[in-house]
């Protein structure tokens, strides 16, 4: 089938990773993908050039502003999108929603073109609404819910996310739960020299954006309070708006290694394979791909019970933190992993098995193909009825 994919290629964030992994997997299965994304009209975004084949085609939409959080399209973006869809004649549109005004126009556009419309809504959330960040995300859900009800299908990641959308008026018939999936062959346990490189006997890791909602400072406060033995290292992989401020307060600690953003996937896998404990202290999440990648590599994971992350590691596949008490709980947990290294090995084995049971990319794409076929069939029935 021919899928018109509307997603992001930059700047680096979870939406970009999701779009890349899913579209590549669809191409591997023989589908045709037209990737529609926001880029400057003069292509001055310095994105890497694409290799086009008969199965792939890029369509760039002009924008006024673009960030990891939201995108403001230019006035011409709507017309370019409509004209491109008329020309491409895809079987279905799949929008990986990027918080853009265009998201609210898509149901109307697709209705005019008689095209079935699927969306992935992976905005972070915390159902318990315990902080400012989670309240802001709740507002995003409230704003989006009326529009999501007009999509043919909305893909979400967990039952608790479904519960939230149901309360906001999105009917069950429009919701499909398809969790994120990770390539468990690529992300797998294996040899790594990262500990030798970092001179670490026990290696803890945070990997992700350095932004307020990720709550990294709670981890750094716990690390400073614990005063773990020499040889224990905390690697911070990623960048973001809080990087400079965090390094100002914690940059002098030789046990904290600031590795920056790492684009090379194999290098990230090498780091994960040599990590003892992965920590994700977020205040809000959807379903973290970084968490799944760490679990798939057999790493013991500690994560807050926000979004679907708590559901992923519950019942022994990881350790669940209360997002309201991250620092105090980590002060207890971090020394335990140092004193009892067997804990990390046991939890890591369970984490890997949890991914294999529920969160592989293969199962994700199987479910997605079935959803596409059902959605196109229902669209054909509706069109034939008129």
Image: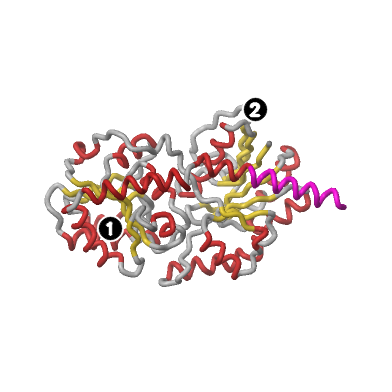
| Image x and y of residue 254, in percent | 16, 50
Residue denoted by label 2: 54
Q: Is residue 196 left or right of residue 169?
A: left
Note whether residue 212 is visible. Answer: no
- 376 inside magenta stretch: yes
Q: Measured along the vertical axis of the image, is residue 114 above or below residue 146?
A: above
In terms of secondary structure, where does tag 2 sit?
loop
Residue denoted by label 1: 246
| Image x and y of residue 249, in percent | 22, 60
Give the total of numbered labels: 2
Q: Quadrant of the N terminus?
A: top right
How many neighbours does mark 2 have within 10 angstroms: few (below 14), some (14-19), or many (20 or more)? few
Q: Is residue 287 left or right of residue 52?
A: left
Question: Which residue does the image show at 67% across and 62% down from the upper left?
Answer: 149
Mark earlier in primary sequence (2, 1): 2
| Image x and y of residue 240, in percent | 37, 53
- 194 inside magenta stretch: no
| Image x and y of residue 244, in percent | 30, 55
Please name whichever residue, 40 or 374, is drawn nearer the observer in this view of the structure.
374
Q: Answer with the quarter of the image where residue 186 lies.
A: top left
User: Mark 2 to mark 1: distance in Å?
Assistant: 47 Å
Question: Which residue does the image show at 57% across and 50% down from the upper left?
Answer: 96
Q: Measured along the vertical axis of the image, is residue 367 above or below residue 211?
A: above
Which stretch is magenta?
A: 370-386
How many neighbours does mark 1 have within 10 angstroms: few (below 14), some (14-19), or many (20 or more)? some
- Outermost residue to the right: 386
């Amino acid at each position: 089938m021919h899928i018109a994919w509307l997603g992001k290629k930059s700047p680096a964030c979870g939406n970009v990773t999701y779009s890349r992994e899913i579209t590549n997997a669809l191409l591997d299965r023989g589908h045709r993908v037209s990737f529609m994304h926001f880029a400057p009209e003069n292509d001055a975004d310095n994105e890497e050039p694409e290799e086009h084949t008969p199965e792939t085609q890029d369509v760039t939409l002009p924008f006024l502003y673009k960030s990891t959080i939201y995108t403001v399209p230019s006035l011409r973006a709507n017309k370019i999108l409509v004209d491109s869809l008329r020309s491409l004649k895809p079987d279905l549109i799949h929008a990986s929603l990027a918080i853009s005004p265009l998201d609210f126009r898509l149901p109307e556009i697709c209705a005019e073109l008689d095209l079935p419309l699927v969306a992935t809504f992976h905005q972070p959330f915390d159902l318990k609404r315990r902080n400012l960040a989670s309240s802001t995300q709740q507002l995003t859900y409230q704003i989006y819910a009326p529009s999501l009800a007009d999509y043919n299908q909305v893909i979400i990641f967990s039952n608790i996310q479904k519960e939230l959308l149901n309360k906001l008026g999105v009917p069950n018939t429009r919701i499909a739960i398809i969790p994120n999936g990770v390539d468990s062959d690529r992300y797998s346990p294996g040899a790594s020299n990262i500990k030798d490189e970092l001179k670490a006997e026990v290696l803890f890791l945070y990997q992700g954006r350095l932004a307020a909602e990720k709550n990294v400072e709670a981890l750094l406060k716990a690390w400073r309070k614990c005063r773990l033995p020499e040889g224990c290292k905390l690697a911070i992989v990623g960048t973001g708006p809080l990087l400079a401020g965090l390094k100002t307060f914690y940059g002098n600690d030789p046990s904290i290694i600031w590795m920056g953003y790492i684009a090379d996937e194999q290098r990230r896998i090498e780091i994960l394979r040599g990590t003892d404990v992965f920590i994700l202290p977020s205040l809000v999440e959807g379903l973290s791909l970084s968490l799944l990648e760490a679990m798939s590599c057999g790493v013991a994971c500690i994560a807050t019970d926000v979004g679907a992350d708590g559901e992923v590691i519950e019942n022994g596949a990881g350790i669940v933190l209360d997002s309201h008490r991250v620092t105090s709980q980590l002060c207890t947990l971090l020394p335990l992993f140092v004193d009892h290294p067997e804990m990390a090995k046991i939890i890591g084995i369970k984490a890997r098995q949890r991914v294999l049971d529920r969160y592989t990319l293969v199962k994700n794409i199987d479910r997605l193909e079935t959803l596409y076929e059902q959605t196109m069939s229902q669209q054909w029935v509706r069109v034939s009825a008129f």
